[in-house]
Image: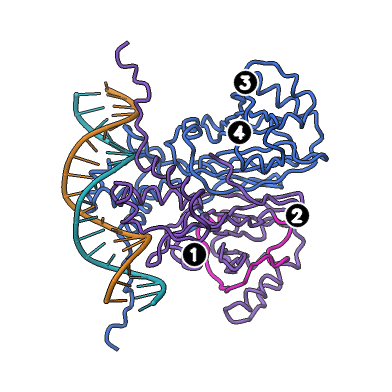
Chain colours: A purple, B blue, C orange, D cyan
Amino acid sequence: MGTTQLESVPEPKYWHLKTVLSEALDQDFAVGEVLPNERELAARFGVARATLRQALEQLELEGRLQRRRGVGTTVAPPRVGVAVGSPQHSWPGECADGWEPVDAVDGIPSAAVLKLLGTPADQPVHTVRRTRVTQGQAVAAELLYVPAASVPGLSAIDAPAGPARARAVLRELQRLALDGQDRSVELGSARADDAKELDRLPGAPVLLVTTRYFTAAGTAAVSVATYRADTCRLTFGDSGVEITETRAAS
Amino acid sequence: MGTTQLESVPEPKYWHLKTVLSEALDQDFAVGEVLPNERELAARFGVARATLRQALEQLELEGRLQRRRGVGTTVAPPRVGVAVGSPQHSWPGECADGWEPVDAVDGIPSAAVLKLLGTPADQPVHTVRRTRVTQGQAVAAELLYVPAASVPGLSAIDAPAGPARARAVLRELQRLALDGQDRSVELGSARADDAKELDRLPGAPVLLVTTRYFTAAGTAAVSVATYRADTCRLTFGDSGVEITETRAAS
DNA sequence: TAGTGGTCTAGACCACTGA
DNA sequence: CAGTGGTCTAGACCACTAG
C-alpha cells in the first residue's frame, strides 16, 4: 500500500486561522469590541501579517468583522436585512423606504445601461442619484435612469440640479402605470464614487441589484443599486414575514 | 495658494492596473482566451506578483476572469443568469430547473438553521443535498432541510441514502399546499464541501440564498443554496422577460 | 504625533494540471 | 515533467484617524 496519501491535503494556514478566529469571535468577543491590531495578532499566531490579513479579509467578506484604517478591527453586528423585493410592483420613491434623493442630471448612460433601456444612444436620459439609509447606516447607492421619452412631463422639469430635481423626476415617474419589473443580483466591486457614498474603499465587495421597470410601452426606467455586501442581507419576502438572522452556512 | 493638494490621492497601483487590464480585456481579448502567466504580466507592468494578483483577484470577483491552478488565467464569459424568483410559489423540485438531487440523510442542522425552521433541536430533520447545473456548468449547491414533522409520510421513507432517497423526500413535500415563501441573498464564502461541488477553492465568494417555505402550519422547509458568485447573476423576474446581459456599473 | 489598517516588494516553496 | 496559480514570509512605506 505504501503511502495511502490520506489527508495529504494540508489546510492552508489562513483557512485554519480563519476558523480559529471565527470561533473566538463567537465565544470571546462582543459586537463592537475591537480586536488586537494586525501586527500583534500575527505575532500571537506565529504567522506573517499578510497571512493573517488573508484570514481577516475573509471574515470581513462574511460580515463578521469591520476594519477601518487608522482605527482598528471591530466585531461587526449581524447583517441588516434590507427589503428589495418591494411589496408588489411599485415605482421607486413611492414608499420612501429609506431612500433619499441626492441629485439628478441629464447625461448619457453607459452602453450597458442603454442596452437595458433599449433606447437609442442619442436620446436624453435623466439620471437620478439616491442613497439608502437603514438604521442610521448608508447601505446602498443607486443610479436610476429614466429616458426623457418615458414621461411626457419630464422635459418640462427645470429645477436646478440637486435633491429637488431628483424628487421632481420621481414624481413624474409615478404618473405612469407600472406594468411589471425585473430584477437581478450579482457580485461586484464598488466604483470610486459609490464607495465614497457607502463609506468604503474603492473595490469593496458590493451586491449589484439591477431593476428594469416596465410599462405597456416598454422599459420606462432602469435602476442600478449598489449595496454594501459586508453589512447587508437582501430580502425578497413575498409574505409579510421576515428572516431575522442568518448565519446559515458552516 | 501654495500646494492646493489637488489629486493628492495617489491611486493604488493595483487599482490602476485593474483598470488597464479591464480595458485590455474589452479590446484585445476574446472570451476563453488565456492571458500571459502572472510572473510575466507582473514583469510587463513592472510590479510585484502580489500586486498584480490583487488586480486579478478583483477582476475575477467581477466575473471578468477565471483562474485555475495548473492551467492559467482565461477571459470569462458573461455571467449566466439563473432564475431564483421562481414562477410564483413552488416547492423545490417541482419544475426541475436544472436541479439534481444528490443525497438525503437525517441529521441535526446547525443552530442557525434550526432557528429558521423554528423547530426544537431534538426533532429529526431530513437534509436533502442538490446541485444545480446550468449550461453544463455547476452553479449552485443546496441543502434543503425538511423537519420530519412537516410531512406525515416522511417518516415512512426507507430508501437508502442517495439520489433516490432525496427524490422521495421531495415527492412527499409536494403533497403539501405551499402558502408562501421568503428569500434572502447575502455574500458568503464557500465551505469546503460546497467548494468541491462547485469546482472552486474553499473560501471562494458565493451568493447565499436562504429560502423559507411556509404552509398554514408554519415553516415547512428551509433551503440554503450556495451560488458561485463569479459566474452567476441571480434573476428575480416577475414578468416573462429576462435581463440578458449586465455590465452595468462603471 | 502615535498607532491603525492599506499597499507594495522580492523573494520562496507548494499543489495542481496537462503533455 | 515543466509550467501554472496558490500560499507564505519578512520586511518597508504610506494614508488615515484620533488624542
**Both marks 2 and 4 on one chain:** no
- Magenta extent: A86-115
Q: Earlier in the sequence, mark 3 or mark 4?
A: 4
Where residue A177 sits in the image (x, y, percent)? 77, 61
Q: Is residue A40 above or below residue B174?
A: below
Q: CA distance from mark 2 to mark 4?
A: 28 Å
Tell me the kind of residue under disc 3: Pro
Asked if disc 2 and disc 1 are in contact, CB closer than 8 Å, the reply is no
Crowding at mark 1 (Cα within 10 Å: few <14, some 14-19, many 20+)? many
According to the picture, the residue beneath numbered tag 1 turns out to be: A194
Tell me the kind of residue under disc 2: Gln
Where residue B128 sits in the image (x, y, percent)? 63, 28
For the point 54% across and 61% down, the residue is A121
Q: For residue B143, which numbered disc appears in the image?
A: 4
Of circles 3 and 2, the one toward us is: 3
Q: For residue A88, which numbered disc appears in the image?
A: 2
Crowding at mark 2 (Cα within 10 Å: few <14, some 14-19, many 20+)? few
**For numbered disc 2, what is the local secondary structure?**
loop
